[in-house]
Amino acid sequence: MGKNFRVRVWLRSLAGQVFILQVVVVLVLIGVGVVETILQSEHDIVDEASARARSVAETFASSPDVIHAMDDPDPSAVLQPKAEKARKNSEVGFIVVTTPQGIRLTHPRPGFIGKKFIGTIAPAQRGQVVVETLDDTDGRFVQAVVPVMDRNRLVALVAAGLRTGKVPTIVNRQLPLLLCAVVAALLVALGGTALVTSRLRRQTRGLDPAELARMYEHHDAVLHTVKEGVVILDGKGCLLLANDEARRLLSLPQGNEGLPIADLGIEPRLAHLMMLGRTVVDKVISVGERLLVVNYQSTDQNGGPAGSVATFRDTTELRVLGDQAESARRRLKLLYDAGSYVGRSLDIAQTAQELADFAVTRFADFVTVDLAKEVLSGGEPTASSGMHRAAVSGIKENHPLYPLNTMIRFASFTPQSSGFHSGSAVLVPSLAESTSWRQQDSALTGEILAYGIHSLITAPLLARGETLGMASFFRSEKPEPFDNDDLIFAEELAVRAAISIDNARRFTREHTLAVTLQRSLLPHNLPCQNALEVAHRYLPAQADAGGDWFDIVPLPGARVALVVGDVVGHGLEAAANMGRLRTAVHNFSSLDLPPDEILRHLDELVTRTEMDGDDRPNSHGLIGATCLYAIYDPVTRYCSVALAGHPSPVFIMPGRTVEHPELSVGPPLGLGLGGLPYEATQLYLPEGSDIVLFTDGLIENRSQGIDEGLNALYNTLADIHGTPDQICDRVLTSALPDRPHDDIALMVARTIPLSPECVAEWAIEPDPAVVASLRKEASNKLNEWNLREKAFTTELIVSELATNAIRYSTGTVRVRLIRDSYLICEVYDGSSTSPHLRRAATTDEGGRGLFLVSQLSRHWGVRYTDEGKLIWCEQSLTGD
């Protein structure tokens, strides 16, 4: 156990490691010798095999028997025994005779006779000898192919070959000598190791070699990895050692160890400081373009060896690195600040101006932003797009650059054109030396140079793979031109700003489409009617158009329906839903239903549409809406109002008093609350009253609630005098929020009651005998209205409708004639039976009443009331 331990310790010592190294070296050398011998032996084997194969092939080919045998009808029978005999005598692997075409005539294996020879025979067919080395499954062999010539005519080919393994080698003969050399080398290595160990013990004073190695490794690592220069001098002031950093800082060449300080060629002040031999702590000395911090101290303190050590620390690079880090930090902060300053709105021009304003004084003296003209309207830029100067900013106002809103088309090789088409920023350090920049406008560029602008960076506004425009940064006050670091910063700043501009562009495009669709779906011209004087306004939201709408629908009996609504959501979807809902309102209005029933039908429609939309992917359907539906009757001067989650209307009475009565408000359309009813409220409105209808965008915004908005609207309306148009303008001027976040639809309708002289009404008993007197009274009324030409037609209509009412109903029948834009005849009865039009046969005695009424009138229809129904028809006053 102890002996094995001592052996392991000795092997780990320096002597043991030297011995192992020597053993390895000896073994490597011996191995190299063996390998060289083997390789030489293999080479000799191949050469010897090639020579033997060639000799055998040439000898057999030169035999006259071969030429004579080729003339025999069966050359194989003649040559096969001769070839085999020669093969055995010459101790080769095979002798094969082939035809000039390479067909075997002999072979050690008779089965291969008559088959194609394997090997290279083309040179032999031309009269040359071919020797080649081949490999097969049994190993390597060498074969030679010799031509057989008869009077310069090729009559046959002879091939001879043998395996290389059959050739004797010299390795076996040299192996004992190699083993003896190995033993001798190992003995010499052991003796040398013993001598080295003895010498090292004397020189290291008995220190363990591992400790010496560890000390050397630490010493070397410190000298070559420390970021300070270290110079060690002996007691005479001569150089003992200088690490890599010291040689770099002091420009010391290699191989100057042992020279005095004065001969090292270093800075005289530094050399004088080191020759004084006094301790120096952190003294700054200029050496060339460097600022070195020097520390110097002797090594003979506390019994150490005579000499001194000087260290040098380069503060110049630290200062440069600090300046670079500070510059990078400032630019990162600028990019961070740009993220919060640029793109605060979704307005393209404002975003471009924010970029220009931000970069001035922080990065450049003058900044221009040019956008493709299609971008400003939300379109896609093209390669041939002209440039619109969207923003200009600078430290001075009287600059010679193109002014704002100028259309520019940059020349082909200008930096702006190159950057726009390549998508990369372009740096022009000196505008005075740039010829491509002057191609744009020689006169203007001359003025720019005379103004003092001397350097340019133009960066593309690149977002989502599209170049929207160019941002150009000019420098004039700072004498240094832009550099590559500035180029990288400008490109990054332009990319960040381009994202904001692209967002604004996309918003502008969608906003324009939504507003265009919204306006196309709203009424363009007010319908002709005499009951109301109407003015309206529609303002889309600045952020995004919504689904607000209004409408005016003429109804039978000179009545008019006023509709205001607001679809949930914004953008194209809300505008499309608004158009669908407005169409539905028109359809339901044609049924001549009261406002509460109209809202109930709308609620069912919206709810059903939402349910159908849930079954279709990516379909939102109608997702809720508010609506106000009001019907004004100029004959009775009553206004019937029903609300579905919508703000109540405001009424301005003739005395200019503002009234906002509490109306029953039903749930918004499409909430699935079908059990909650909608209620209509009847209000009497004197002549000249104003009905103010609006959406919640007028009274609600981020800075105030609905109550505050309503109070502001009431106060504004109380001070307004004028026409409905003037009221609309005044309301939008006074009560409109600064930045409305929602659409605003406003409609003001002033009532114009129908004069009593234009209305005639009769109540008759359910007796057919009174129909004759009714016809006479109707004819007299038409004479008063100067409508004698309508008397006959009106008498027939009144007679038919009154007769049907008397026949199929009970109670009093009321008949009313109204002169408005049309001559209207209405017959009221207490029956809820719905009449229907049919064509009577020629043999029928009746059934032609409603058919005649439909033929004689412009329109006709039925409206149901709480007491029954009325049938109405309209006649044109201008003639049939």
Image: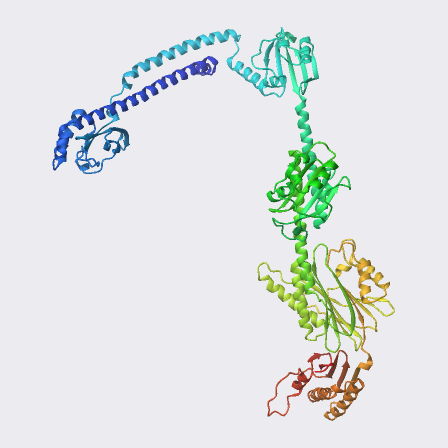
Left or right position of 794 against 468: right
**Residue at the bottom extreme?**
769
Can residue 519 be seen at all in this image of the molecule? yes
Left or right position of 306 against 871: left
Whole-percent x, y for residue 250 in the image:
63, 16
**Above or below: residue 364 compared with residue 704:** above
Identify the residue at horizontal 56%, vertical 14% (top origin).
254
Q: Nearer the viewer, residue 562 or 832?
A: 562
Can residue 670 be seen at all in this image of the molecule? no
**Residue at the front extreme?**
443
Q: Quadrant of the N terminus?
A: top left
Q: Quadrant of the C terminus?
A: bottom right
Q: How many marks?
A: 0
Q: Nearer the viewer, residue 228 or 248?
A: 248
Q: How is the image coloured?
A: rainbow
- Picture quarter containing residue 694? bottom right
Q: Nearer the viewer, residue 455 or 377?
A: 455
Identify the residue at horizontal 67%, vertical 23% (top origin).
316
- Picture quarter containing residue 55? top left
Whole-percent x, y for residue 549 in the image:
71, 64
**Above or below: residue 760 compared with residue 661:** below
Identify the residue at horizontal 74%, vertical 34% (top origin).
477
Whole-percent x, y for residue 699 in the image:
78, 59
Q: Nearer the viewer, residue 420 or 60?
A: 420
- Picture quarter containing residue 762? bottom right
Whole-percent x, y for residue 65 in the image:
13, 29
**Residue at the right extreme?**
655
Left or right position of 707 against 408: right
